Amino acid sequence: MSELTRLSAVEIARRVQAREVSSVEVTRAHLDRIEAVDATLNAFLHVDRDAALAAAAAADDEIAAGTVRGPLAGVPVAIKDNIATRDLPTSCASRILEGWRPPYDATVVRRLRDAGLVPLGKTNLDEFAMGGSNENSAFGPVRNPWDASRVPGGSSGGSAAATAAGEAPLALGSDTGGSIRQPGAFTGIVGVKPTYGTVSRYGLVAFSSSLDQIGSFGRSVLDAALLHEVIGGHDPNDQTSIDAPLPPVVEAAYAGARGDLAGVRVGVVRELSGEGNQPGVLAAFTDAVRVLTDLGADVVEVDCPSFTYAVPAYYLIAPSEASSNLARFDAMRYGLRVGDDGSHSTDEVMSLTREAGFGPEVKRRIMIGTHALSAGAYDALYGRAQKARTLIVRDFAAAFEQCDVLVSPTVPVTAFPIGERVDDPVAMYLADLCTVPTNLAGNAALSVPCGVSADDGLPVGLQIMAPALADDRAYRVAAAYELARDSSSGRPFADTIPEPAVLETSS
């Protein structure tokens, strides 16, 4: 790995803007890294080397002219392939959209360009963001940099693996039920799900509109906060966008890095932090809670009894919204069209196209959602799921009256072997146990690495949840914990991620 691909985004930005190194040199180092390791990882679906180097050259010219557009100007970034990009394909890892190029940029992409960041390419994902392992891509699974026989988590596994492996210092993902936090935990990096409505979803291909949220990946809390600040803020193009100031996440990350949590009340969610967690995960989480106590936090246990309904409620609400959102992919508007030879009716062309274009997990969720919304099942399934959602929101409200933030393991297990859960959707869905409550309530949450499991040597994530529009609380606690963890080990956690030789031998 080149020295440049080991650096944090903050350090890259400092060196580029001080003209100690050019953005072109940094971008070329990351493109070379992609060429070296992505045959193993399969993290990227599209890379445009020429466009990336041209954007980097433009950033260098502006810096030389004394114009710096933002704190991350000249820093490369990867973008999940369900976020619209004008000059790159947006496939959602699906055959039905293969080769489709949007005529516009998503708001978050436009903000990246406006801030002078350098898009490297589009990253792999579970098809239409449906999955918890990144095995559902039509273009093959992504592999975990820690062990290439394991999943990186989903659905933003491509963005997480790329960031962890040094292919990109920063990346964008989307989180519908934990799809940023879970792969962040599995690959040993920071993954953030902002408060719903504080980062524009304009240009994000919708899976479940009331749950989807774009967020950031970084190898440190401050890196993730800086990217969050670039993409966040009100957007009139998104009707769900909140017209309120973005929480001061960067300021909070700096405050946390002073290492003092005196007066901060931390709640350990009893329903997420006991039975059902892998022993090594629970041990790492327990040690992280001890560190928070040592930093001065007031740690107490809290009960959120309705969280036990979160997974079944999520897997009715999300597929229901998906069954509606994906109806637009019907062979008439976008991408693939099958059977259009004059011998089939319009309905037959639609059916043949959807049969050929959608993968098994997408079909499963469309069928679940369509059934849940049907006249005979609506009250018993979708209606009850929405009532459970209300109970979960009330549990969060009650818990946040007692605590500033809540904590739990991000995922009850470490990264599992590729193929282990493919034929057991229920086991796959239960991996979302700790993350889906936050999406149902619309709160903020992030995952920060809290060591490795003694069971298998794979990374474990600490989830920190905060009330809506109080994302800064999670950043402060995460940054303080990160400082203590790195001070204890003597190096940043990201420096422990395996090198390419390990990837090649374990693939």
Image (cartoon, grey):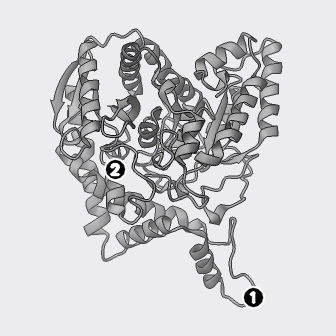
Which residue type does callout 1 highlight? Gly
For the residue carrying disc 1, how many other residues have a C-alpha within 10 Å: few (<14), some (14-19), or many (20+)? Answer: few
Residue 445 in view in this figure: yes
In x, y percent, where is residue 63? 78, 16
Q: Is residue 403 left or right of residue 77?
A: left
56 or 139, which is in the foreground?
A: 139
Which of pointers 1 and 2 lies earlier in the amino acid sequence? 1
Q: Residue at x 75, y 16 (%)?
A: 21
Q: Residue at x 60, y 61 (%)?
A: 94
In x, y percent, where is residue 72? 64, 22
Secondary element type, mark 2:
loop
201 or 45, which is in the foreground?
A: 45
Residue 159 in view in this figure: no
In x, y percent, where is residue 173? 54, 42
Residue named by callout 1? 342
Q: Residue at x 36, y 62 (%)?
A: 425
Front tag of 1 and 2: 2
